[in-house]
Image (spheres, rainbow, N blue to C red):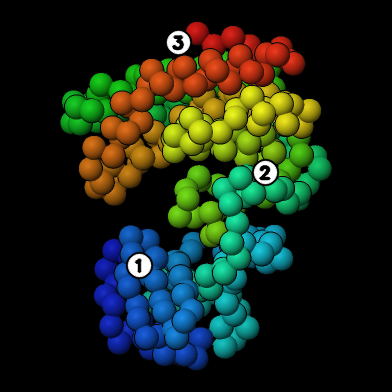
Amino acid sequence: MPSFFSYIDIGDKMNQFITYYYQFSPSKIEKKKDYFLIQYLDTIYYLYEVSDLNMVDWQYSVTKSIPFYCDFIFNRFQSIFSDLENHSFVLLKRSIFSFSIYEYFLSFYYYDCHFKLFWYQAWIKRSDFLENYFFQIKGTIPIVDDSFDYYLGLLEMAIYYIRDYSNYIGMGCIQQKKFSLSMMDNPLNTIIDVKERNFAEYLKYLFLSREYQSINLHELIQKNKGYYNFNIVIARVLYPNYYFDQLDEVICHGESSDTLIPFISRIIEFQKYIKLLIQEIQQFVYIKKVSF
């Protein structure tokens, strides 16, 4: 079934939909790539189409008491789901809670004390899929032709790094499914994963934002040295989800391939960054070596 956003127009239909289900008349409706931004008085709402209602119901239940997540809005029928033309939607109210990136990544909301790490098999499957997919598109996007093998190699290195921990049991925490600064407060972007994921994604964020150049990495690592399995952390830092996620945007959503340049142009810098992290970690615990 095609996405509702592929053909819906902003107009009377959306106004009527909001008014009928939520009993207010929007002062502004703006169509974004995969949601509607709705304004009423001084309040901002986001309207998302959803398909897996059970997952969304779970996301509502686990995030409703966490202050920085957007609030799910119940409709006139006391449901978080509203239907239009055989499509289901949820309305989210923007949170006014302010938090820093550091607070977000290192403030944990535990869900399950016994959570099995699933990355090893998931990354193998993604590697196989990507290799086959690249074979089909090879020759169509020069910048992808020039960079794909490197990032597939990083993924393979991450798989090697995580192999010894394929049966690891860790602390389950509520986290982002897909890292995005614009989605950090979106409850539809939540999953349960081990706490090492958040710290690793924070370390990747520090690199991609260049903030690592202005903070004390030694102090950050030392402060957290007794809290994480650092072999798992490094495996996740190696995992180049940022590149493959952006590649999806280029291939599937028509974004310019130039959006890959900020990653590709910093390959050598990233290798130095990984080595710096390992140098800091090896001062207190043994971890595998990385060879680029």
Amino acid under disc 1:
Phe
Amino acid under disc 3:
Phe
Say if mark 2 contacts mark 3, CB within 8 Å.
Answer: no
Whether residue 123 is visible, yes or no, is no
Q: Is 242 above or below relative to 268?
A: below
Q: Residue 126: percent from the left, percent from the top? A: 47, 31
Label 2 CA crowd tier, 10 Å (few <14, some 14–19, many 20+): few
Instruction: Choose the circle earlier in sequence order: 2 or 1.
Output: 1
Q: Distance of mark 2 from mark 1, alpha carbons?
A: 36 Å
Q: Residue 84: percent from the left, percent from the top? A: 42, 78
- The residue labelled by disc 3 is 292
At 28% from the left and 32% from the top, the residue drawn is 261
Amino acid under disc 2:
Leu
- The residue labelled by disc 1 is 4
Mark 1 lies on a secondary structure that is helix
Q: Distance of mark 1 from mark 3, alpha carbons?
A: 44 Å
Q: Is 24 above or below relative to 3?
A: below
Q: Residue furthest right?
A: 113
Whether residue 183 is visible, yes or no, is yes
At 25% from the left and 23% from the top, the residue drawn is 145
Q: Residue 279: percent from the left, percent from the top? A: 61, 14
Which of discs 2 and 3 lies nearer the camera? The answer is 2
Instruction: Choose the circle earlier in sequence order: 2 or 3.
Output: 2
Which of discs 1 and 3 lies nearer the camera? The answer is 3
At 64% from the left and 18% from the top, the residue drawn is 280
- Kindly indicate the quadrant of the structure image that contains residue 147: top left
Find residue 84 and name its label.
none
- The residue labelled by disc 2 is 106
- Kindly indicate the quadrant of the structure image that contains residue 31: bottom left
Q: Is 154 above or below relative to 209?
A: above
